[in-house]
Image (spheres, helix red, strand yellow):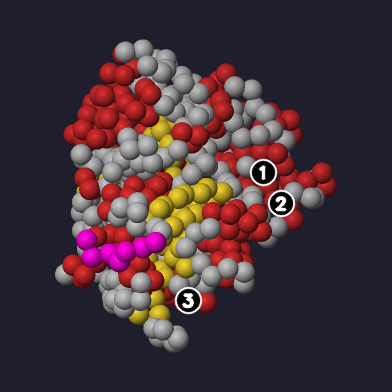
Amino acid sequence: MYTQNLEISNLPTMNEPMKLLMVNIYPDDSIARYTLSSYVLKAYLESKIPEENLVVEVVNFSPAMSTESICNEIKEHSPDVIGYSSYVWNIEKFIDIIKTLRAEMDFVHILGGPEISMERITTIGGSKVADFYIIGEGEIKLTNLMKYLMFRNAGIEMPLPPGIVGWEKDSDNMVYQEVDTIVPLEDIPSIYLTGVLEDKYYKGGQVFLETQRGCKYRCKYCVYHKNLPHVAYYPMERVLEEIDYLIVEKKVLALRFIDAVFTSDMDRAKLIVEHLATLKEMGINLPWIYWEFDYESVDEPFLEGVAALKKKDYINNCEEAVPVNRPQIYSQMLKDYTVVNCLGVQSFNEKSLKAVSRRPVNRELFRNFMEKCRELNVVLKMDFILGLPFETLDSYFEGLEFILPFFRQTDHVLNIHVLQVLPGTGIEKLYGDYNMQFSINAPHCVLSTNGMSSEEIASASIITAVLFRIINSPLREAFFEMKERTGKGYISIIQSFVEKIIADENFANTALVKNDRVDDVYWNQDVFREIPTDWLQKELECIVDLN
């Protein structure tokens, strides 16, 4: 086995330890001010390589920071090696950072994370950007790469570890040996219980908790399954201990379970819910909790347990909140729910779902599930995707017409994203089959498909923005009342609003009017400022002719 030549006992003697700096840029809409992956890698590295051989530090940056400021701070740490956890929201800035640092200092740069695939390496410049790329799961591969670099610094030549992309010396010839290296999850130390995560990230913030790795689905647009052969689980004893530590001791504001499908093992999911209920019964204030499941995998006892975690028995914040000119989802609409249940529906178009390896939605089962959530007063954040293969403008709108009635007299959240053709996914390999055009640069948003032209996706994006502005605010009840008065379809009403916005010179400088299209960042943020409440309320109160 390759790693036999890289055993700790064989590492060369060093005058001082090698220093690895892990660099994070967290997304701009995140409550948390760190990303989980670098800390997991740090915990694993420190459990495998003694500190006299390797020192690992992690730094976190806001996406608003300039490249120059980030580079200056990196240089202050004086690392030997820099590792970057690459995602769609930070890869372009990382490329800029590496190019800037290369012009000034001789660091070794390593790019890994979901954004890195063999195809993506060629589009970002290959060896002209990073010295090494890690493909897939990183714990074992990064550990072996750091050992390899220690031997190389000592003048001892070793073959490049499997799973690492590198280049022959003084050559553009790529070196790569594919390998599946799945670390047993019980071998990864807890970043919380071991103190790897610094205290400053607990104060008034959000933390991430991974209880499993992999996914029971193989959706072609997704990286969550990580091509693992099965779902692996952390020991339940450890999971419950981490929950107690985060909620009881650190008193975190929000706890986000980052499992692909929290209920992939229903018995485990129920144990966690029961443990949270025990904490609540002890008088412990639970934080906001986020997890994701699908409507087919949950049963009534699980939903009853989730409902019991609310801070009061019945909640309908949309009836009480006053609409304002800013997003109110997390500040008011979800107040007192404790658990926000994320539901990945994605589309109601059977052909689209089949193209991305998802099961079609059984509408009768879905209705029953939604009615049970209404009965139990369980809040849902429902995810959909604009731009899937075979989705047409008509089928996209038909799906919205079907789902919107379930929002009435609830605080459910509508969450739609433009399809991203992510590196390493099945959809990246098949995009030509579906006549997809998409942005090569992150976030790789689809521009057109075999079902929608670029003009149709642009039109859908503007209609979606106005729908978001109304349905994800306390204005939603007035919207439903307007539907009853006019007898028109939901999308027809929204289209009439779009036409009025375009015709009104007061909106001439808004993104809705000036831009060809808008995206999900705009839907969730700026549209609330650009289309004011007073104007919408006036329009919603009118009995208008929509013919």
Q: Dominant secondary structure of the magenta stretch?
A: loop
Is label 3 or label 1 in front? 3
**Residue wearing tag 1:** 526
Label for residue 511? 2
Dot 3 alpha-carbon crowd within 10 angstroms: few under 14, some 14 to 19, many 20 or more = some
Which image quarter is the C terminus in?
Answer: top right
Please report the bounds of the magenta region as a residue range.
9-15
Task: Determine whether label 2 and label 3 are within 8 Å by CB.
Answer: no
Judged from the image, the secondary structure of the residue bearing numbered disc 3 is: helix
**Residue wearing tag 3:** 126
Judged from the image, the secondary structure of the residue bearing numbered disc 1 is: helix
The residue at 23%/42% (across/down) is 234
Instruction: Report the Cα–Cα distance between label 2 and label 3.
Output: 36 Å
- Amino acid at dot 2: Ala
Does label 3 or label 1 sit earlier along the sequence? 3
Instruction: Report the Cα–Cα distance between label 1 and label 2.
Output: 9 Å
- Amino acid at dot 3: Gly
Q: Is residue 264 left or right of residue 428?
A: left
Q: Position of residue 486 (x, y in %)?
A: 61, 35
Residue 375 against residue 155 in the figure, above or below: above
